[in-house]
Amino acid sequence: MKEKKPIGGRIFTIPFLICLGIALIALYFLAKRFIFGLGAVTNMNDGYPWGIWIAYDVVVGTAFGCGGYAMALLVYIFNKGEYHPLVRPAIMTSVFGYSLAAVAVFFDIGRYWNMYNIFLPWYANTNSVLLEVALCIAAYCLVLWIEFSPTFVKTEQTKAKLNKVMFIFIALGILLPTMHQSSLGTMMIAAGQKLSPLWWTGLLPLLFLISAITMGYAVVIFESSIATLRYKLADETDILGKLSSIMPWLLGAYLIVRFGDVIVRGHFGLIFKGDLLGNMFILENILLIIPMCLLAVPGNRKNARLLFLSAVSLMLSGGIYRFNCYIIGFNPGTGWHYFPAVPEIFITLGLVSVELMAYLWFIKRLPIYRSA
Amino acid sequence: MKKQNHFTLDEKLSDISRRDFMKFCGIMAVSMGLPIGVAPQIAAAITNPKRRPPVIWLHGQECTGCTESLLWTSHPSIANLILELISLDYHETLEVGAGHQAEAAFNNAVTENAGKFILVIEGSVPVKDGGIYCKIGGRPFTDIVKETAAKAAAIVAIGSCASWGGVQSSEPNPTGATGIPEFLKGTTVVTIPGCPPNAYNFLSTILHFLTFGKLPDLDEKGRPKFAYGRLIHENCERRPHFDAGRFAEEFGDEGHRKGYCLFKLGCKGPMTYANCPSILFNEVGSGAWPVGTGHPCFGCVEEGIGFTIPQFTQADVENVTPAAAHAPIRAERGAGVSKGSAALLGGIAGAAIGAGAVIAKRLGDADKGE
Amino acid sequence: MEIKRRDFLKGLASGALLAVAPPALAGSPKKSRLPDALGILYDSTLCVGCQVCMVACKKANNMPDEHYGPQKIWDNPIDLSAKTLNIIKEYENGNGKYKDRKIDGYAFVKRQCMHCVDPSCVSACPASALTKDRKTGIVTYNKDACIGCRYCEIVCPFNIPKFQWEEPFPQIVKCQLCSHLLVKGEIAACCSECPTGASLFGPVKDLLKETGRRQKMTPGKQYDFPISSISSGKTQTHKAARYIPHVYGENEAGGTQVLYLAGMPFNRLGLPELPDRPYTALAENIQHMLYKGMILPIVALGGLIFLVKRTGEKEE
């Protein structure tokens, strides 16, 4: 097994500086948000109280951050030790995805100075799905950083100590995402009649859980492909291809549940109405069916390009599914409209930029990848 | 000259029937917001000569419009009646004498009735440059007011000039025109602002003092609450038009002729507290007040509004209430796609697709290279 | 996007697929009305659209004016908002001449917090900032608990809670049935000011009885209608309208303490068609099924720890 080590090189490269620029613009809008209120920078309103900050930064962002979860699931539950090299980069993307989601929540909630209330038992509402999600995500952030800590913990003593208890955190690292990713679906069950029947179903938690896993796998492939190409790392196509062989089964299962549910509930006709919602449903699922078909052919799984494209398609599909559930398929019903405002988009872009900058810094300074 | 004055008034008095007189007392009671049963009490107060306090009426910087409006009150002989009955000992406009004669009359009246008379001041006091802008008999008005006020039983500032400075006090206020309450700070001064004020508000105040021996309830600006406690906008006959959104857009247009609301012409009714729409002027019938005749309220009674905010500047609406129109069941709200956000998202999508294509291509090349 | 009871049950059933335990299908029992619950009966047929309830509400709750359109001269909100807890809306069709008629007619509807029997907002709030009074059933807001997540806005089937978007330190705003007046022995301001008795305050059980009485009235005949409060003893005589045989809020979303009577279908008045359980009850069911006492997660964690250890040992 090749050694993991930092890639090295300059930090302030052009991509890094572009990201920095975007982050600074976002910072300006953030200042506005905290001085003048949410209405000053976002188009969120009383009809659409959740905009892209929740839908993208949190709901999609954490799903992208499920790489670590998906790999841990594979390595530890399905006992596939050969995927171990993919775990550390996957954990890293998870660390970023989740940490930034937590930060995004802080920007989004109106009474952020009261945020600690969710940790106070006397304010806890055990009926609240959101409380479970919030606590789980908070706990998982912590778990992720601990899982990730071997990369930056220097002393051997601490490392040894960490190693002894790591199994608890790995187990938690599987349990917690299972809990909150499914609950992200349960959250929208409560939206009831406001969510289009194409998306509203009692199976939302199951669908969200599966989509989190598929998106997690896709992100691992995506990230690994780019890193391999950019930094001339050890080629991981073989292992990625092997990993992808599971995907058609998972996607197939998802599609059966997805379509079966829509048909059983008698809303199949809505798909072909030709309106925005129907088209979004079709788009979401086509982007899922194509990679499923591609990856079903063993030869395609050895093709780095097709692997990459399938991963992108899956990420898009999952992202669109979650957007559909949280914004596009959501309609409070009394004439409300929502489309993100420019500053709102910039703040999300800024978060992504920070994530990219952190990624660049981490892979150059910490032992994440195996070099070629 | 005094005699002659008395003579005319006596003559006039004989014209008044008991019925008219009681009617007047009734009107007074009602305009003060008192029960009609108080009218006999008022009548008794008026007709009992012993309880009639003498009135001394001073004029400062003003146009005498207040006196005019009082004299022109058209209910039978009210002006004369009241001038007689309150024993008006000194009034420059109604004075027949002039020069030293008048001065002597004034000094007599003040000395004789020291501590008993009601001092009515019409007009503002110019305080700039030692008060040289208004002198009577060679003495600055500032001194006259101070000296006379010290001996008065009660002080009434009639008209906007006396109440808060009036038109002369508008920027740049060259004479330093000052209202009586401001000038005599620390003394209770009843103010009856208005340009001119409604005579009934003045008469009612005086009669309240006569009847009950004390002044009516005053607001923080010294105005009798019975007269200045109501917002014009909320008592205006044109209010339904306001609520329904029907406005006169310019003088003489269709809306104006139909009696629509004058808000858009700068009516200050929404900011002005006065009973004009309730008691009207000069008992000539309905509509006898500025807004009733089609002229937007000027806010003449209110300091900082009348002579300050331009006539056609729209008023700020206090006590905002719903329009007569209703909200629809479904109302389109929230922001849709804007050019900026669409362009930005398009840009991001384009960049992402471009980057994805490049990566995919390179990945393919790398494959071939192997 | 009308979800009927049938769909709701199907949703419930599909949600139950997740569960290992069969009782999940039944779920938790439906919450029943509190015996001393207080509420409002709004009778659209009696409402004349004078909007005095809106004025009274703003005064009683010290709410600011809200302006739509270029001139800031009226308080004319177009919907409930962070500045408006109560609003009269108007349905209009065709020439809008006839009251309570679907075609060429008009009708008013009052919108405010429904004070649900099983409130979605209370179920969803992660910080218990929204609570239902155990006696009166009034749903109130505690700003010190609120984190401003706005999940209450997502889950409220009636779109009631509103957020102060323009404030740096915002709050959630909604009708609290004038709780601050009730402790003084007064009644909700909108009802005490209503001239026709269209908004009638009282114990929900009495109000429900009153709806029964009105439903039985002969249209066109004169009847006495209580005004302000059902126990005020004051009445007004009106001609009974032709009521539709449905009391909105009797069962909607598990029942509400604000009840509606009208002369036309409620969906025309902007009141959504809802199943007789709140959707949050379904979410709660799933949640409790999976996390009750955290037993399932703890068992799962034990299994995971075992698996992780096994893998780790094999690798070593």
Image (spheres, rainbow, N blue to C red):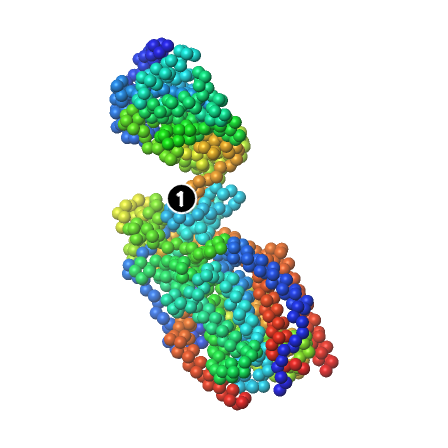
User: Which residue in the rendered view is the most extreme toward the right?
Assistant: B369
Looking at the image, residue B192 lies above or below residue C88: above
Looking at the image, residue C41 lies above or below residue A151: above
All told, the count of numbered labels is 1
Q: What quarter of the picture does the C terminus of chain C occupy? A: bottom right
What amino acid type is highlighted by mark number 1? Cys
Which chain does the residue under circle 1 lie in? Answer: C
Q: Classify residue A8 by image quadrant.
A: bottom right
Which percent across, then down, holds residue A247? 58, 79
Looking at the image, residue B216 lies above or below residue A348: above
Q: Classify residue B29 by image quadrant.
A: top left
Looking at the picture, tell me which residue is in the foreground, A74 or A292.
A74
Q: Is residue C41 visible?
A: no
Residue of label 1: C50
Which percent across, then down, holds residue A15? 66, 67
Seen at 45% across and 17% down, the residue is B138
Seen at 40% across and 19% down, the residue is B71
Seen at 35% across and 30% down, the residue is B188
Looking at the picture, tell me which residue is in the foreground, A53 or B217.
B217
Looking at the image, residue A355 lies above or below residue A346: below
Looking at the picture, tell me which residue is in the foreground, B7 or A327.
B7
Numbered disc 1: secondary structure? loop
Looking at the picture, tell me which residue is in the foreground, C243 or C304.
C304
Q: Is residue B344 visible?
A: yes
Seen at 35% across and 67% down, the residue is C30
Which percent across, then down, holds residue C161? 43, 57
